[in-house]
Image (tube, rainbow, N blue to C red):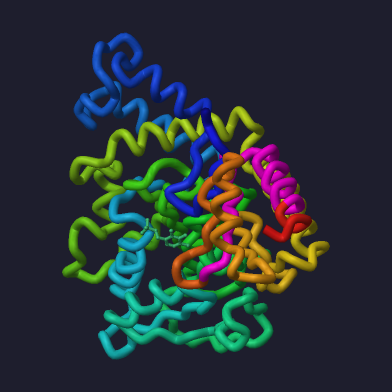
Amino acid sequence: MRKFNFCAGPAALPEPVLLQAQQELLDWGGRGCSVMEVSHRSPEFMAVAERAEQDLRDLLSIPDNYKVLFLQGGATAQFSAVPWNLFGAAGSRESWVADYIHTGQWAEKAIKEARRYGRVNIVASSEDRNFTYAPGPDSWQQSENAAYFHYTTNETIGGVEFDYVPEVSCPLVADMSSNILSQPIPVEKFGMIYAGAQKNIGPSGIAVGIVRDDLLERALPDIPRSLSWKIAADAGSMDNTPPTFAWYLSGLVFQWLKAQGGVEAMAASAAQKSALLYEFIDASDFFSCPVEKSSRSRMNVPFVLADERLDKDFLRQAEEVGLLNLKGHRSVGGMRASLYNAVPLEAVEALVAFMADFEKRRG
Ligand SMILES: *Cc1c(COP(=O)(O)O)cnc(C)c1O
């Protein structure tokens, strides 16, 4: 029996996708083997790869002057890849500077990695209020000659999401790992977008990169080849053996998303699901959400109980009624419900009903 899964990542996948993968596992399209057991350069797999790219292009209306890359090393590899790929046109090493918005744990990891290569200018930070909001553009301190501007569109751990796209004069780079494909995005405003797959795309082991083609010429000369966007682009993301099964499964998710009505439908669903949960939490005097209302994530909803001694009971009883993986990140405690595309409205309805009942009983 499938249960309702609120895991932050690797996260729930659409049931029809899992069923199709299951059906095709021993005999993929009459070939007598699975998709995992053929060459990534075979015409059969090339067709899978090309279809996945085209479907992603359709879903996000990606302009032709952007390359779509299927990358390895997760979003974390991109924390390093971004400075390696974009500092090369910025003159001598002393002048390498990049602008970053600091919004919490993922932003911080990206910042720490960039600091290994150049100077990081913190344009804005929400540390003053414990990373409970997305800073607005009024107070920014942008540098004059930044090689790029980086931000995290959705902080998966803190549950903070930007509801606007920064306007900047250098290439805008975004870590969209946990809210990509949950709404339409103006791709043309970005220089580079990256996302690990295991939240809103597919299984872990693959990451998506969307990069404007003129930025492929800005890499540092001694960039490791496995981090180079240009090498990946020139090789059709097959400079070395890609994670073919993850790529195939991501492609099935793209097909599923199209059949659901694309990112517009996902945006409507995300608004409905998150509103249901936030409204319940705000009306309750037992549960509360620490994030400021204007910056609340539609994907990751952190919340706490009025009495943390009841946390264990809450999690145990939730699991008993089929509500999985509600424990908050180990660094912050409390609870977190992740409401990615593959989490149905019924899951959130069941969660709210359980929370209301738990509140009445106080454990
Ligand atoms: C999960 C996550 C990452 C890390 O992804 P990995 O694939 O584990 O490297 C980075 N950024 C954000 C916003 C995330 O949610």
Q: Position of residue 183 (x, y in %)?
A: 64, 49
Q: Quadrant of ligand 1?
A: bottom left
Is 30 left or right of 352, judged from the image as shown?
left
Q: Residue at x 71, y 68 (%)?
A: 288
Q: Position of residue 352 (x, y in %)?
A: 72, 49
> For the view shown, which residue lies furthest in the right direction?
283
Q: Position of residue 222 (x, y in %)?
A: 17, 69
Residue 104 colored magenta? no
Q: Residue at x 79, y 63 (%)?
A: 284
Is 100 left or right of 337, judged from the image as shown?
left
User: In this view of the protein, which residue sits in the foreground, 88 or 102?
Assistant: 102
Residue 353 colored magenta? yes
Residue 164 shows in the view: no
Quadrant housing residue 283 = bottom right
Is 234 left or right of 110, judged from the image as shown?
left
Is 122 left or right of 38, judged from the image as shown?
right
Q: Position of residue 233 (x, y in %)?
A: 31, 49
Q: Residue at x 30, y 29 (%)?
A: 46
Residue 112 shows in the view: yes
Q: Residue at x 65, y 71 (%)?
A: 307
Say above or below: 363 vs 152: above
State the extent of the magenta-drawn residues as a range.
Answer: 333-357
